[in-house]
Amino acid sequence: MRSAVVILTVFLFLLAAPALSEQKRPGNPREDSPFGVSLSLGGAASGITLDYFPSPMLNVEARAGLEWGFGLSMHPFGNDDERHWSLFLGLQGGVAPFPEIDLFGDDENEQEEYDSQPVLFVPLGTHYISDSGFSFEFELGYLHGFADDDSEAKAWPLWIGLNLGYRPF
């Protein structure tokens, strides 16, 4: 009786061994976790960012904090399931406050410390998504602040953005 139990256990183990050794291969991280939330510094706007990948090659985002912004980014290699890192080219718009610097003390409006103006940011960057859902994004690009009633146009040819976040689902 004892040998029958041992033989049956070994037989069941041999049948189950291929299924046990076969690991589930993770899919495309941009398809597996399309929604993300992150803390953003720089870029078109700093604050909390919500983003979504409707497809592995396109990311849509909205930011809110001291200012607000929105954007799109194209990930040309986003369809590759093996890539956790993805290069992207983006276009972001928003409203950003810039500190008003009064070097000579001749500013008539002392109440206003920041000058908010519409901005456009064209970043080139890289985005990382881990299997656990951690995400990291670094972007470098051109930031243009448009002229409005209160301020002149401004341009920064080399502007940096950084996002750290989590992709729960």
Image: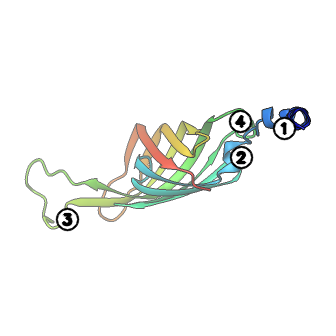
How many discs appear?
A: 4
Look at mark 2 in the image and give the residue it sits on.
56
Report how far apart the C-alphas of labels 4 and 2 lie in the structure.
8 Å
Left/right placement of residue 21 relative to residue 29 reads right
Mark 2 or 1, nearer chain start? 1
Q: State which mark lies toward you, 3 or 1.
A: 1
The amino acid pointed to by label 4 is: Phe
Q: Residues within 10 Å of mark 1 (few under 14, many from 20)?
A: few
Q: Residue furthest left?
A: 105
Q: Nearer the viewer, residue 15 or 71?
A: 15
Counting from the top left corner in percent of width and height, residue 15 is at 91, 36
* Disc 4 secondary structure class: loop
Look at mark 3 in the image and give the residue it sits on.
112
Q: Quadrant of the C terminus?
A: bottom right
* Disc 3 secondary structure class: loop
Look at mark 4 in the image and give the residue it sits on.
77
Report how far apart the C-alphas of labels 3 and 1 lie in the structure.
67 Å
Which residue is found at the position 13% from the left and 64% from the top? 110
The amino acid pointed to by label 3 is: Glu
Look at mark 1 in the image and give the residue it sits on.
19
Left/right placement of residue 95 relative to residue 56 reads left
Report how far apart the C-alphas of labels 3 and 4 lie in the structure.
45 Å
Which residue is found at the position 37% from the left and 62% from the top? 148
Q: Residues within 10 Å of mark 4 (few under 14, many from 20)?
A: some
The amino acid pointed to by label 1 is: Ala
Label annotation for residue 52: none
Q: Residue furthest front?
A: 1
* Disc 1 secondary structure class: helix
Q: Residues within 10 Å of mark 3 (few under 14, many from 20)?
A: few
Mark 3 or 1, nearer chain start? 1
